[in-house]
Image (tube, rainbow, N blue to C red):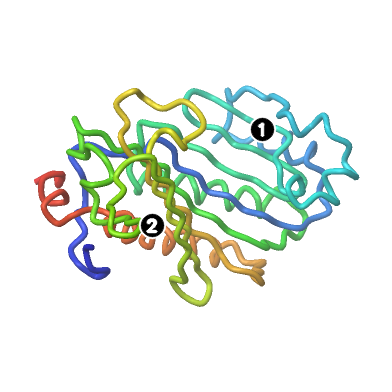
Amino acid sequence: MSRRGSYIPKKLKYDAIIESIVELRFETTTRPEFLLVRLAEMDAWKGFTESRLPAYSLPEPLRDVDPNLRYQPIFELQKDQRSLRIGPRVISYHLRKPYNGWAAFGSEVATVVNALFSKVEAPVIKRLGFRYLNALTQEFHGIRGVSDLDIAVQIGQQTVSDGININVKMKISDDTNCLVKVATPTFVTGSLSAETTVMADIDVFTPEPFETTDSSIAIKWIDNAHEAEKREFFVLLKHETIAALEEK
């Protein structure tokens, strides 16, 4: 396996990212209906379409007591491949492919964070998350299957190379954890291109307990989470794969 701290390319010839997600969970007295209106009025989301999400139809008391529903968004602002999802205690920003690079996406994320702090009464951030969903293919990334990654899965003495769904959780630092999921398409829900051979889901998040009321701390954490995500993604690839994929 590629060692952490080894060379990471600045840019790949063909990006594997099919969706980028930033999520902020928070406590506030501001109603999500008011937050939706305030965000929709901002220049960053002018022209976005407003809609209700499925969780909206569930009674609020039920959402409050069920841990699986407590942080579900109930409204969405959406345009093309971008969407902003809003709930009583959560806001998440989604960019579906094509990925526009960290300089651009990081700027959009900072806009989301600053908007939350300017449009919500006294927000207290309780959890931050940064996630990339990567769809690897043979044509663009030279990945025919799990055997082309720098990982090995064995049952007894037999190496398993298909029908795999691996979840590995690790501590990155005192305020950062990471969950790496590697799966073959059989185990992936949602639409994937027929060419996808392996999904690599890299989810970086704050451990409990976490709390901040400072937007600059949130933005700095997300920036660091992006670096951690890159490291964990390239750990999955063999050195020769990285060399072949790097844009010179």
Near mark 1 (Cα within 10 A), the count class, few <14, some 14-19 or many ≥20, is few
Secondary structure at numbered mark 2: helix
Q: Are marks 1 and 2 in contact (CB under 8 Å)?
A: no
> Which residue type does callout 2 highlight?
Glu
Q: In screen coordinates, is 70 left or right of 182?
A: right
Q: Residue furthest bottom?
A: 174
Q: x, y (%) of residue 62?
A: 87, 43
Residue annotated with mark 1: 41
Q: x, y (%) of residue 26?
A: 71, 57
Q: Residue at x 36, y 56 (%)?
A: 155
Above or below, comparing residue 177 to residue 238 in the picture? below
Q: In screen coordinates, is 32 left or right of 204?
A: right
Circle nearer the N terminus (1, 2): 1
Q: Residue at x 76, y 52 (%)?
A: 67
Residue annotated with mark 2: 229
For residue 76, what is the image quadrant?
top right
Q: In screen coordinates, is 107 left or right of 119?
A: left
Above or below, comparing residue 159 to residue 57 in the picture? below
Q: In the rendered view of the protein, which quadrant contains the N terminus?
A: bottom left
